């Protein structure tokens, strides 16, 4: 079998289906990471496998948000209550769903109504979320 992007995506979908029984049995969420490396000569691909306690992906996402928000709460006025808080930007509704804690310029992860995820800076949130009062604390 030749591996390419389409095959990896199909493999990831098939893998998710295959582990559903384990997820239900142990009360965890199992996911395969997006970063896949492939060695063509050896025919081996590697990926990160993540197993997290929680009954649904939404529970896991919320717990991760609550953990990660502590990294930014000292610099920005954002807290645990801001998970999935809606805001409008250029006439479109978005929700704050998480953070990329290692990203310096665009650490915020937002999601639109269609479920597509984007990353943005706190300054963008400051424009879009006036009720957040996102300002740098000096």
Image (cartoon, rainbow, N blue to C red):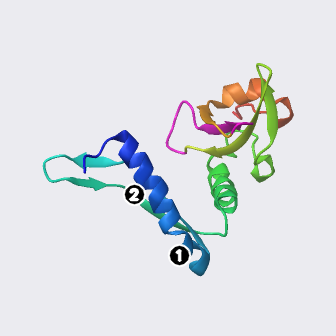
The spot of residue 39 in percent (x, y) is: 20, 48
Q: Position of residue 93 (x, y in %)?
A: 79, 31
* Circle 1: element type: helix
Instruction: Indicate whether residue 35 is drawn in magenta.
Output: no
| In front of the other: 10 or 43 | 10
Residue 131 appears in which quarter of the rendering?
Answer: top right
Give the residue at mark 1: 22
Residue drawn at 75 percent across, 36 percent down: 113
Q: Nearer the viewer, residue 13 or 61?
A: 13
Residue at (55, 69) in percent of width and height: 20
* Callout 2 crowding tier (Cα within 10 Å): few <14, some 14–19, many ≥20: few
Q: Viewed as shown, does residue 73 lie left or right of 104?
A: right
Numbered label attached to residue 48: 2
Residues tagged 2 and 1 counted as in contact (Cβ below 8 A): no
Up-down relation of residue 106 to residue 53 (above or below): above
Q: Residue furthest front?
A: 1
Q: Quadrant of residue 135?
A: top right
Res 28 seen here: yes
Q: Dominant secondary structure of the magenta stretch?
A: loop
Q: CA distance from mark 2 to mark 1?
A: 17 Å
The residue stretch that appears in magenta: 101-114
Q: Residue at x 62, y 30 (%)?
A: 120
Residue nearer the viewer, 6 or 56: 6
Report the residue that reaches farthest toward the top.
90
Say whether residue 34 is visible.
no
- The residue at the point 61 percent across, 33 percent down is 118
Q: Is residue 92 above or below residue 69?
A: above
């Amino acid at each position: 079998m030749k591996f390419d992007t389409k095959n990896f995506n199909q493999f990831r979908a098939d893998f998710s289906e295959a582990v559903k029984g384990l997820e239900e049995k142990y009360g965890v969420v199992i996911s395969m990471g997006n970063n896949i490396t492939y060695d063509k000569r050896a025919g081996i691909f590697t990926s990160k496998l993540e197993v997290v306690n929680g009954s649904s992906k939404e529970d896991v996402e919320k717990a991760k948000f609550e953990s990660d928000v502590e990294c930014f709460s000292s610099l920005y006025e954002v807290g645990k209550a801001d998970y999935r808080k809606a805001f409008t930007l250029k006439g479109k509704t978005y929700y704050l769903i998480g953070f990329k804690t290692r990203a310096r310029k665009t650490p915020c992860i937002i999601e639109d109504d269609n479920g597509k995820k984007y990353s943005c800076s706190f300054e963008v949130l400051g424009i879009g979320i006036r009720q957040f009062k996102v300002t740098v604390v000096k």
